[in-house]
Image: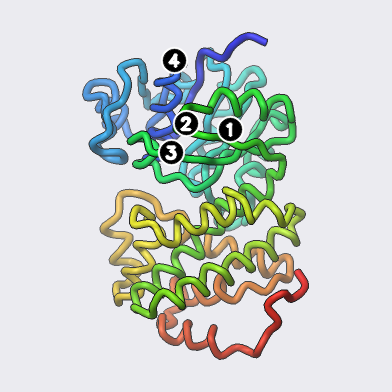
């Protein structure tokens, strides 16, 4: 098999830029698509993404464009890293330019609002059937700033084609970026998406200054919700005790770089969601994913009280303290209840 030389990265947010930097530093020819022309211009002239990854120097070999056609021209693989709420639109615009089957790695951590579809399902609806088997998912505990600064990071790559997953596992690996192979496409996606909802709740707990006991309980019971929903949707429960599950959950619920935890803290301290969103230029995926997660819980008949209360706070006008009180005062349960 010929070695990979050209790869397109679709999405120049912090995570997309960090992954593009990693691949360019490995010697690949990388074209990074940015929705904002000014971001593409800054990357090409200043070799920095001052909007989404400020202060990180990018390789001279990394080029950016705001043209999807130019980004994917002659590419041998594609890394998809757009926010979930624009994923379908970008894929629809991208589809005509994918004239031949290429491996596609989804690194978007979210669920489509409205349809409650996983990103790979959106891809399968929009892209040609010849591309479906080559779709993979990359997820795990990974702050873009730390990866770009050379901090050790471990993630997992999941797909249905064993040989393809093994090939791209090696392509992505560096001395500071360790990639584990996985084949649970549904579980890896759910873990990466649902942890953002629990991180919002954990931030609310911290914003209310309820203590470390409460945060630990919230994370643990949040994981139980993720496992229940994942099992109902056909995922392997063991996936959620790995990097894309508990690994990403702990990072996002406790890390100071977590956008979702930060939003939750601000809500817990009394700010309105509208005010918070007005001050952000980056996406906190958990806000949109919260609605989709609750939709999935109802669709599959799964008990997800933390997700339910988080939605009530975000969109139903419920007070944070009342939500916490209602969680604590529910009927007594067995911890190891059936899935």
Q: Earlier in the sequence, mark 2 or mark 3?
A: 2
- The residue sitting at 56% across, 58% down in the picture is 194
Q: Which residue is mark 4?
A: 27
Horizontal placement of 46 versus 10: left or right?
A: left
Q: Is residue 54 above or below residue 58?
A: below
Q: Which residue is mark 1?
A: 105
Whether residue 235 is visible here, answered yes or no, is yes
Q: How many marks?
A: 4
Q: Is residue 85 above or below residue 128?
A: below
Dot 1 falls on a residue whose secondary structure is strand
Res. 100 image quadrant: top right
Q: Which residue is mark 3?
A: 152
State the residue in front, 273 or 170. 170
State the residue in front, 208 or 273. 208
Q: Is residue 189 above or below residue 16?
A: below
Res. 71 image quadrant: top left
Horizontal placement of 101 versus 113: left or right?
A: right
**Category of crowding for the residue at label 1, using alpha-carbon neighbours closer than 10 angstroms: few (below 14), some (14–19), many (at least 20):** many
The mark lying in front, picked from 3 and 4, is: 3
Cα–Cα gap, marks 4 and 2: 18 Å
Q: Earlier in the sequence, mark 2 or mark 1?
A: 2
Cα–Cα gap, marks 2 and 1: 10 Å
**Protein image colouring:** rainbow
Dot 4 falls on a residue whose secondary structure is loop
**Category of crowding for the residue at label 3, using alpha-carbon neighbours closer than 10 angstroms: few (below 14), some (14–19), many (at least 20):** some
Dot 3 falls on a residue whose secondary structure is loop
Cα–Cα gap, marks 2 and 3: 24 Å
Q: Image quadrant for the C terminus?
A: bottom right
Point out which mark residue 42 bears: none
Q: Position of residue 252 (x, y in %)?
A: 45, 57
Q: Position of residue 267 (x, y in %)?
A: 35, 72
């Amino acid at each position: 098999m010929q070695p990979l030389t050209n790869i397109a990265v679709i999405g120049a947010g912090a995570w997309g830029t960090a992954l593009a930097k990693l691949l360019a530093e490995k010697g690949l020819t990388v074209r990074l698509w940015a929705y904002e022309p000014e971001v593409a211009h800054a990357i090409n002239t200043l070799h920095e993404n001052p909007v989404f990854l400020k202060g990180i120097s990018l390789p001279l070999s990394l080029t950016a464009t705001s043209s999807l056609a130019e980004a994917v021209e002659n590419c041998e693989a594609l890394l998809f890293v757009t926010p979930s709420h624009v994923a379908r639109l970008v894929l629809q615009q991208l589809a005509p330019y994918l004239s031949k089957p290429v491996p596609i790695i989804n690194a978007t951590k979210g669920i489509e609002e409205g349809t409650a579809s996983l990103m790979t399902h959106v891809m399968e609806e929009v892209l040609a059937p010849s591309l479906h088997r080559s779709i993979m998912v990359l997820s795990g505990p990974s702050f873009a700033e730390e990866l770009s600064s050379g901090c050790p990071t471990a993630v997992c790559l999941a797909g249905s084609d064993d040989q393809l997953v093994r090939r791209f596992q090696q392509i992505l690996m560096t001395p500071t970026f360790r990639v584990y192979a996985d084949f649970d496409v549904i579980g890896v996606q759910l873990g990466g998406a649902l942890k953002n909802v629990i991180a919002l709740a954990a931030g609310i707990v911290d914003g209310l200054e309820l203590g470390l006991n409460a945060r630990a309980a919230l994370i643990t019971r949040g994981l139980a919700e993720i496992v229940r929903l994942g099992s109902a949707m056909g995922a392997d429960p063991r996936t959620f005790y790995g990097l894309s599950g508990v690994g990403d959950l702990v990072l996002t619920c406790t890390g100071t770089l977590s956008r979702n935890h930060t939003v939750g803290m601000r809500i817990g301290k009394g700010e309105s969601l509208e005010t918070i969103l007005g001050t952000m230029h980056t996406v906190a995926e958990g806000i949109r994913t919260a609605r989709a997660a609750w939709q999935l819980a109802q669709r599959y008949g799964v008990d997800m009280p933390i997700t339910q209360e988080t939605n009530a706070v975000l969109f139903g006008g419920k007070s944070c303290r009342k939500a916490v009180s209602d969680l604590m005062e529910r009927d007594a349960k067995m911890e190891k209840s059936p899935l």
